[in-house]
Image (cartoon, rainbow, N blue to C red):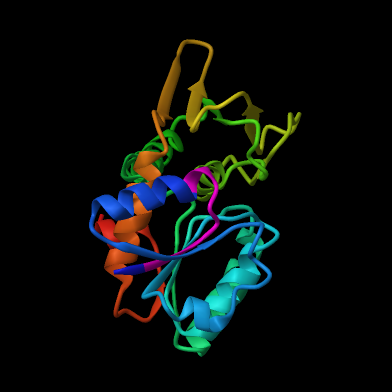
Amino acid sequence: MKIALIGYGKMGKEIKTVALERKHEIVLEVDDHNKDIISLDDLRKADVAIEFTNPGGVVGNILKCFEANIPVVVGTTGWHTRFDELKEICLEKNQTMFYASNFSIGVNIFFRLNDFLSKIMNNYPEYDVFVQEIHHKHKVDSPSGTAITLANQIVKNMDRKDKWVNKESDNIRDLEIKSDRVDEVPGTHVINYYSLVDDLELTHVANSRKGFAVGAVSAAEWVLGKKGVFGMDDLLKF
């Protein structure tokens, strides 16, 4: 499989390592130095693109892949407000987009646990809940895409929560997401249910970026030959 890496930072380099281990070929590496001179012909040399850049550039990169008629696997977060728009364009143009807020298999299991637990906790109003996420200080978006996915699951399942907020709130119907940025950590996410008598905590800690890279390359392998919009549930068949 020939891969175009759109975004060649720490994640891009980790993805390259995993892809080469799995006997794939990197035919294009796009970073800040060459992003403005990459042509559609350059992209068409690849069977699939893997996009890990930034919220400001991701939409343009996705559209460029559509134009080049190659599937794109998107790991950039912070653009969820435009997801429905890009989904519609993808389907109208008969293109292929695979998006996940987190490509780690462990995190996607964590999503399932969070969904299940929040449905249970809806029946116990004596517990309040918050989401905490900790990432490296260079992460641009806050809260993380993973934290937003977790928070949206809780809001959907719990009658006593109306929306999530990324700040302290005096409104008990707000679900607080607490975002911390510290040094070079791959990422930690915590769901904490607390009451006067006890706390119940669900935690995922990433030990390295390799888990994200393996998931992204697996998604690229899986999506070849398919048309439409997909995510980790499609890949993992939960």
Q: Is residue 34 left or right of residue 28?
A: right
Question: For the image shown, how many numbered marks are present on the structure?
Answer: 0
**For the magenta stretch, what is the residue range?**
3-11
Give the image quarter of residue 130.
top right
Looking at this view, is 128 or 105 the one in front? 105
The answer, for residue 82, to whether it is visible in the render is yes
Does residue 14 sit above or below 42 in this rendering?
above
Residue at x 38%, y 55% (from the top left corner): 216
Looking at this view, is 100 or 23 the one in front? 23
Give the x, y percent position of residue 136.
59, 31
Looking at this view, is 51 or 135 the one in front? 51
Q: Quadrant of the N terminus?
A: bottom left
The answer, for residue 158, to whether it is visible in the render is no
Does residue 157 sit above or below 63 in this rendering?
above
41 is within the stretch colored magenta? no
Q: Quadrant of the C terminus?
A: bottom left
Does residue 1 sit above or below 101 in this rendering?
below
Q: Is residue 63 left or right of residue 45?
A: right
User: Looking at this rendering, what residue extends furthest in the bottom direction?
Assistant: 93
Residue at x 51%, y 77% (from the top left corner): 42
Does residue 74 sit above or below 93 in this rendering?
above
Residue at x 48%, y 28% (from the top left corner): 190
Residue at x 42%, y 78% (from the top left corner): 45
Give the x, y percent position of residue 24.
28, 62
10 is within the stretch colored magenta? yes
Give the x, y percent position of residue 187.
50, 32
Q: Is residue 144 left or right of residue 48?
A: right
Give the x, y percent position of residue 138.
65, 36
